[in-house]
Image (cartoon, grey):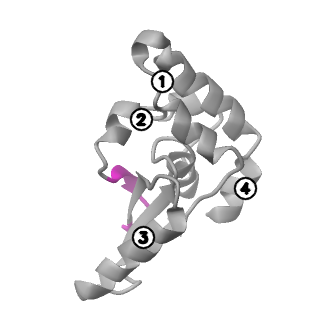
Amino acid sequence: MNILFLGTSGVHHALIAANIYLKKPVVDFNSIPDFANVVLESSGFPIYVGEDNQGNQVYSLGAGSDINMVKKSIEGLRNVFGYSANDLVVKPVSVKGEKLLALLKLIPASLGGRLWHKLLPALILKSQLKNIYRDI
């Protein structure tokens, strides 16, 4: 089975949720591989995070502003291609401030974007850990 954590950003709260699900340490978000990697986020591809104890592959994906529509689209495609919920589980992850996270990734590196891509999301998401755990 594949498990896809879906957020407005695949390199922020969805990535943290996937790491928590895999029981990886998330004390320092900046130590999580690919955290706030906006180049990777802009590729549009799911980010492989790891494999759980049952052999399920775990991914995170940024969906933009309409997570529910993207979830329905992925589940619809899953069904069209003949797969079931046992083959692919889509878990949306929602936090307060997620729209701001989506805007921060638009700041160019030349204007200090790299700093803002990591610093502000880490501050926002530390206060949202309870909501992230809820969505796992």
The residue lying toward the viewer, choosing from 115 and 60, is: 115
- Rounded to the nearest whole Å, what is the CA distance between mark 3 and mark 2? 24 Å
Label at residue 131:
4
Lower sequence index among marks 3 and 2: 2
Q: State how far apart marks 3 and 4 are (Cα).
A: 25 Å
Residue 96 lies left or right of residue 73; in this view the side is: right
Q: Along the polypeptide, which appears first: circle 2 or circle 4? A: 2
Residue 132 visible in the current orientation:
yes
Q: Where is residue 18? Give x, y as percent.
A: 51, 54
- Dot 1 amino acid type: Ile
If you read the primary sequence from the N terminus, does the residue marked by circle 3 or circle 1 appear first?
3
Q: Nearer the viewer, mark 3 or mark 4?
A: 4
Using the image, tell me which numbered label, if any, was put on residue 54.
3
The tag earlier along the polypeptide, 3 or 4, is 3
Mark 2 nearby-residue class (10 Å; few <14, some 14–19, many ≥20):
some
Residue drawn at (26%, 86%) of the image: 80
Residue that numbered label 1 is attached to = 107
Q: Quadrant of the N terminus?
A: bottom left
- Asked if marks 3 and 1 touch (Cβ < 8 Å), the reply is no
Between circles 3 and 2, the one closer to the viewer is 2
Circle on res. 34 = 2
Q: Are marks 2 and 4 in contact (CB under 8 Å)?
A: no
Mark 3 or 1: in front is 1
Label 1 CA crowd tier, 10 Å (few <14, some 14–19, many 20+): some
Q: Residue furthest left?
A: 81
Q: Would you say residue 71 sits in the magenta stretch?
A: no
Label 4 SS = helix
Q: Which residues are magenta?
A: 46-56
Amino acid type assigned to the residue bearing label 2 in the image:
Asp
Label 3 packing within 10 angstroms: few (<14), some (14-19), many (20+): few
Q: Secondary structure at mark 1?
A: loop
- Measure the C-alpha gap from mark 2 to mark 1: 18 Å
